[in-house]
Amino acid sequence: MCGIVGYIGEDKAVDILLSGLKRLEYRGYDSAGIAVLNGGMQVSHAVGKVQQLADRVYRDWTPEFISATRLGIAHTRWATHGPPTENNAHPHLDQSGRIALVHNGIIENYSDLRQRLAAEGHTFSSDTDTEVLAHLIGEYFDGDLLSAVCGALRQVEGTFGIAAICVEQSDRMVVARRGSPIVIGLGDQETIVASDASAIVAHTDQVIYMDDDDVAVIERDGVDLRNIHNVPVSRQVSRIEWDAKAAEKGGFEHFMLKEIFEQPEALRNTIRGRLDLGRASAILSGLSLTSREMAEIQRVVLMGCGTSLHAAMIGEYFFEDLADLPADVEQAAEFRYRNPIIHSRDLAVAISQSGETADTLAAVREAKNKGALVAGVCNVVGSTIARETGLGVYLHAGPEIGVASTKAFTSQLLVLLMMALKFGRCRRLSRQSGEALCREIEQVPDLVQQVLQRNQQIAEIAAKYSAARDFFFVGRGYLYPAALEGALKLKEISYIHAEGYHAAELKHGPIALLHADVPVMALLCDVPGKEKTLGNVEECKARHAPVVAVATEGDRDAIRICEDVIEVPRTSTYLSPLVTVVAMQVFAYHVARLRGCEIDQPRNLAKSVTVE
Ligand code: F6R
């Protein structure tokens, strides 16, 4: 969703801000803007891409001005309050035009505040909640931007990550957060802030992750951290563990393709140091529970949205089959509003690549309120969910830039599998089974590599189906959530209408839609349920629907019955969804490429869904 960059230092602020915005493009946005201080306030906005903003800035501002400017803020906006227009693009100014603000999040009481300010004579030029906040800061301003921001934020309900600058104090910027991340990068005589570390990593690896209700004065050589009541607070400096290259395409046509192909390496990083062959278990240091505490857990509640929800659904099987633990899956938005029943011996596990998804975060808070133990499975280090859960396991998959989640999903599966192994070993799982599972997990990167070696063959099959208007994905057992994930991948990047179903559900309705122009992807790996899915494939064929299978290599049934077969290596049941989904990621990618879609930034989608 929206992105923020702010810079103060000895370098050219305009260039740094625009290249920072480019690094945030993957988050999804529809307009962009920049405000800088150099003898006064200069602001520019553009609808569309960051490049359009850059063209405008380099056309309208003189080279001398650009090279002498040392402080500014910039933003990419994903429209919420009001359409994507230049007027609605950030930065927004206060009534005096001397304070500029960029904001991520939602000011829930903006309408009341706007009415009050309008009654006092304020005039607004946008539909946004952000402009109201800019005016409110202006109301509180009496020469000190920090106290003005603190005063205004104390009036605000909702979420924010903000950066503000003002003409009167051109040696600083003030940033704050509640529910919307702000990371402060500490460089040498420069400080760069952003909503996401990928805009910072080219400058420094030393960062401070702000906490909710932190406010900070940012200067070129330091940071003064306060809380919203203007009382000093201290936060530790962390190190970003990946470099700028990890967030670049590295020769691939799209980030998504790069991330698909990075999976063997990402999975190696997820596993590294975490398998304990001696104990036939997993070492997950962030999940610091004693064996006794683990044995006492009575139920696991797995929560997430989208792809992470599909990982949760597969996690349910892992926990039940390996750890002998009842497990429930909760769509996070449903969980937060449903008044769910939670016990103190429940372990709630929030699964989120970004660690910032609004509904998943709210579900974490609800589970905590109700006394559950809560753990996070996140990729982004220092993200809100990772910090609020305390307990948890990082994916270590590296930055995921493509909007469609790929490597995070497969890493989530491995983390959940290792968690189930660890819990299992404190309960009913034998040493022998634990050891066998450890050995299998070690093989996963190679198994995924084998799937990727079939890239060309999958591309050829994808070409046959790239003109489809509708697609069904079906599977059973472990391959049922995999079918949902396959359908999600295809629909989000290729815009083909794709539905994932349990294979048994076909005859309860969807089969009515099948005919010669509606292909079916059948997940047929050699695992329990395969024979029955084969029966369902026959039913599809009887309606003339072409069937593509993802099946274990050499599977004669699949080859005999289906039009096309994408072969994947033989695995245990536990790993079958993992290899199957990788094959479907590759399939979806090629279909979308052949249809000329904007793969890394599909329409209407944002990488991190920080609003409801
Ligand atoms: C789909 C996709 C989304 C995310 C969902 C949750 O490819 O990426 O469905 O999985 O928005 O995001 P996280 O995992 O960041 O909570």
Image (cartoon, rainbow, N blue to C red):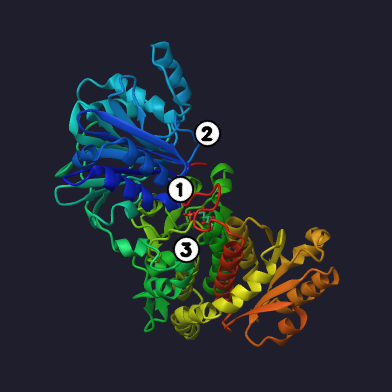
Q: Nearer the viewer, mark 1 or mark 2?
A: 2
Alpha-carbon span between mark 2 and mark 3: 28 Å
Find numbered disc 1 in the image and state the secondary structure of the residue it sits on: helix
Mark nearer the N terminus (2 vs 3): 2
Rendering quarter of residue 525: bottom right
Find numbered disc 3 in the image and state the secondary structure of the residue it sits on: loop
Alpha-carbon span between mark 1 and mark 2: 27 Å
Q: Is residue 340 visible?
A: no
Q: Nearer the viewer, residue 535 or 227?
A: 535
In this view, 560 is above or below 358: below
Q: In the rendered image, which residue does mark 1 sit on?
A: 361
Q: Amino acid at mark 1?
A: Leu
In the visual, does 474 lie left or right of 128?
Answer: right
| Pointers 2 and 3 in contact (C-beta within 8 Å) | no
In this view, 374 is above or below 264: above
In the visual, does 271 lie left or right of 584?
Answer: left
Q: Amino acid at mark 3?
A: His
Find residue 437 and report its horizontal and vertical position in percent. Answer: 48, 81
Q: Nearer the viewer, residue 284 or 449?
A: 449
Residue 83 circle label: 2
Q: In the rendered image, which residue does mark 3 sit on?
A: 254
Find residue 528 and report its horizontal and vertical position in percent. Answer: 67, 78
